[in-house]
Image (spheres, rainbow, N blue to C red):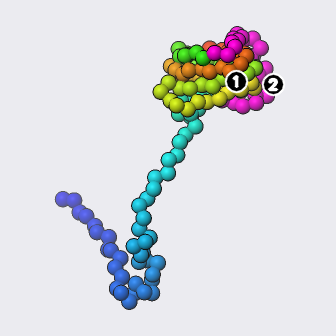
Amino acid sequence: MASSSIAPMLTLSPTSAKKHKRFVPSPRQYQPARAMKVEKPLEELYNVKVERKVAKERLVELGVSRWSTWKTGKCQLPWDWQVDQLVYIEEGEVRVVPEGSKHYMSFVAGDLVRYPKWFEADLFFNDFYQERYSFRAFGDD
């Protein structure tokens, strides 16, 4: 048989209520709670990792100079990643709009971006753009 315990309720008499006004809220103090809308950054939502203004030492450590190069001009491309891809942006800017989103992530020259496998997005390039990229296997860092 389960036992239950009941915590005593705090009750204030009219005389004690005057002495302890902080325990007796007025009707004006009861206001509906408003939920705060806290949005996570898109990078966090879509598991896109970015390092801004990457140091030359980090680029040497990763061997970026040996990675493949990709260039484009002003255009829009739908893209999906079949594997993780590490990208170092050498010149220009890309706006990445994840599939189903109305918001975008912006990456510029000097950023190192890791796109996760199966990520889908539209890429917007407003001018000349150049990147170095490397496909990564699961667990590569």
- Farthest bottom residue? 15
Neighbor class of circle 2 (other Cα within 10 Å; few <14, some 14-19, many 20+) is few
Image quarter for residue 51? top right
Q: Give yes or no for residue 60 being in the magenta stretch.
A: yes
The part of the image, by quadrant, that contains residue 77 is top right
x and y percentages locating residue 35 in the rendered image: 46, 52
Q: Is residue 13 above or below residue 59?
A: below
Q: Secondary structure at mark 2?
A: helix
Dot 2 corresponds to which residue?
Answer: 56
Query: Helix, strand, or loop for circle 1?
Result: strand
Per the rendering, the mark at residue 35 is: none
Q: What is the distance, in whole Å, between disc 2 and disc 1 at their CAs? A: 19 Å
User: Residue 93 shows which numbered tag?
Assistant: 1
Neighbour class for label 1 at 10 Å: few (<14), some, many (≥20)?
Answer: many
Magenta stretch: give its range: 50-75
- Which amino acid lies under the numbered mark 1 shown in the image of this protein? Glu
Left or right, residue 17 beside residue 127: left
Identify the residue at image location x=34%, y=85%. 13
The residue lying at 44 percent from left, 70 percent from top is 29
How far across and how far down the image is residue 66, in percent? 75, 11
Dot placed on the residue nearer the N-terminal end, 2 or 1 = 2
Can residue 28 be seen? yes
